[in-house]
Structures are given as C-alpha cells and as structure tokens.
Image (cartoon, rainbow, N blue to C red):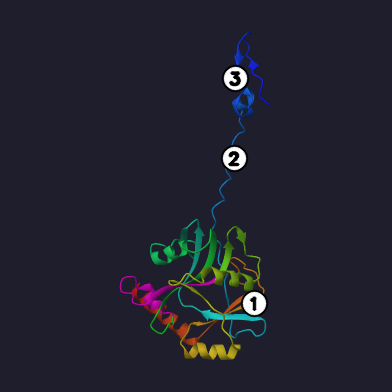
C-alpha cells in the first residue's frame, strides 16, 4: 500500500514520507553505544612455593623431578608481553632477554609460570658457574618450567599439582628453546638418589601428588634432597666469595 503524504506544521504544505519508515524522533534519538569492557587488572607477582630440605626422599604418592642448579624465576605473560622476575620479584629480563622474548610468544592471553633459569653444558647438566658468567658464557641458557599458576584468567593455585603440570606441558609443548618442561622422573627414591649422584646432578625434588600451590610456604608438600657433591661445591664457592670480598 502506498504511504500517504503527511502534512507539515505549516498548513497547506505536504512533507514527503520518511524513508525506511523512520519517524522524526527515531532519527533524532539514537541508542547510546555499549560501554567498552573494563580491562582486566595486571597480573601480580606471586611469592614462589619453597622446598623443605630433607635427609631422605619420601616414598609413596609423590612426584619426583630433577633439582636444577640455577636461578628461581617467574614468568608473567600478558597480551604478548612478558616479565621475567627473580624469586624476590626483581626483573631478570635485561640479563636473559631471549627467555623474556620466548615467554611473550607463548600461545596464551595471560599466564604465570614458575621455573628455574639454568646454563646447560654439553652433557645437558646445569652448570651454575657458567650461569653467572655473563660475558664468557658458553653453555646454553634455558628456563626449565615446572609449574603453572595462572592461565587465561583462571587462577590455578588451588588446582591439583598434576592438573597444573598437564596444562603447563600443553602450553610449552611447541615453544622450543630457551623454554623447557621439567619432566617427571620414574623410579624409587633410592634409585633416583643414586642416579643423581652418578650424573653429578644437584639433587632431587619430591612433590606431593594432588597438592595445591602454596606461595611463600615451606611446610613439606615440596621437599628437596641435595647430593653431597652439590652441598660441598656450594660451600667451597661461598668460601671463595668470602675471601674475595
């Protein structure tokens, strides 16, 4: 049906029908645009969970890993940017720029990862003295990751250890060097201790299966066994530094 022309306020004049059926008011009053979503707050540094020293490794429902000889580090990723922090929350990005860049390329929106920066010699063993040599370092520097505290808006601190590690393994699966995943060791405590000593490793970490991540806590869900060789080496190194001071 054809639309009937409407009369204007002035008598005798006929206005053309509005296009698309709009009324004068609908042209004048528009719906306000939807407000932009508030940006998510920046992720904060989380105090790292600590290991309780033990004289022997526990048996039973525990997960075992290599104890890496290096610097404890936390990586915080947000929108393709990263922060690389020490166990005290100070920045390590200037000292290890390749690691910071690799973290920023992880396939996620936001994440907090926990690990250890190490320098690996030609046999794959961590060399702490090489790690401290910034100019003449020949060993390959890696960030060995063993826990995931946050992923894409989800706080994972209360998730079981195995669930956090599964998500972490997926996250870093295709990352490649300088990022590494710290795999689980299989075998009994005595065999692992013997192997660690034979391979001249720093020691073994044991973590209670199903445990939560407890920031700044050393109550026994994570324990560490250090080889005598490592303890003697660190003692000698401390003595040398005290003589040079």
Q: Residue furthest top?
A: 11
State the residue at coordinates (57%, 91%): 191
CA separation, marks 1 and 3? 80 Å
Quarter of image, res 219: bottom right
Q: Which residues are magenta?
A: 126-146
Residue 28, x across and y down, in percent: 60, 25
Q: Say which of marks 1 and 3 sits in front.
A: 3
Q: Is residue 145 left or right of residue 178?
A: right
Residue that numbered label 2 is attached to:
35
Of residues 127 and 17, the one drawn nearer to the viewer in this rendering: 17
- Name the residue: 39% across, 74% down: 131
Between residues 181 and 210, which one lies in front from this camera angle? 181
Question: Cβ–Cβ below 8 Å for labels 2 and 1?
Answer: no
In this rendering, is residue 59 above or below 209? below
Using the image, tell me which numbered label, if any, was put on residue 219: none
The residue depicted at 65 percent of the width and 67 percent of the height is: 159
Q: Please provide percent x and percent y for residue 2.
A: 66, 24
| Residue 29 on image: x %, y % | 61, 27
């Amino acid at each position: 049906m054809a639309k009937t022309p409407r009369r204007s306020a002035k008598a005798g004049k006929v206005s053309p029908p509005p296009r698309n059926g709009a009324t004068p008011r609908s042209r004048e009053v528009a719906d306000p645009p939807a407000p932009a979503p508030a940006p998510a707050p920046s992720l904060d540094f989380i105090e790292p969970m600590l290991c309780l020293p033990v004289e022997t490794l526990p048996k039973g429902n525990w997960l075992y890993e290599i104890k890496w000889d290096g610097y404890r580090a936390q990586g915080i990723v947000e929108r393709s940017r990263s922060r690389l922090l020490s166990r005290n929350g100070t920045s390590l990005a200037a000292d290890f720029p390749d690691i910071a860049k690799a973290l920023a390329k992880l396939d996620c929106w936001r994440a907090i990862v926990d690990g250890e920066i190490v320098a690996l010699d030609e046999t794959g063993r961590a060399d702490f003295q090489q790690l401290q040599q910034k100019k003449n370092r020949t060993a390959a520097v890696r960030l060995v990751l063993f826990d995931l505290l946050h992923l894409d808006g989800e706080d994972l601190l209360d998730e079981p250890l195995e669930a956090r590690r599964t998500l972490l393994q997926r996250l870093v699966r295709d990352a490649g060097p300088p990022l590494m995943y710290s795999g689980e060791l299989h075998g009994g405590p005595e065999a692992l201790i013997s192997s660690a000593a034979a391979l001249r490793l720093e020691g073994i970490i044991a973590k209670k299966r199903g445990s939560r991540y407890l920031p700044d806590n050393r109550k026994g869900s994570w324990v560490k066994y250090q080889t005598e060789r490592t303890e003697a080496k660190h003692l000698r190194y401390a003595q040398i530094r005290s003589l040079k001071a």
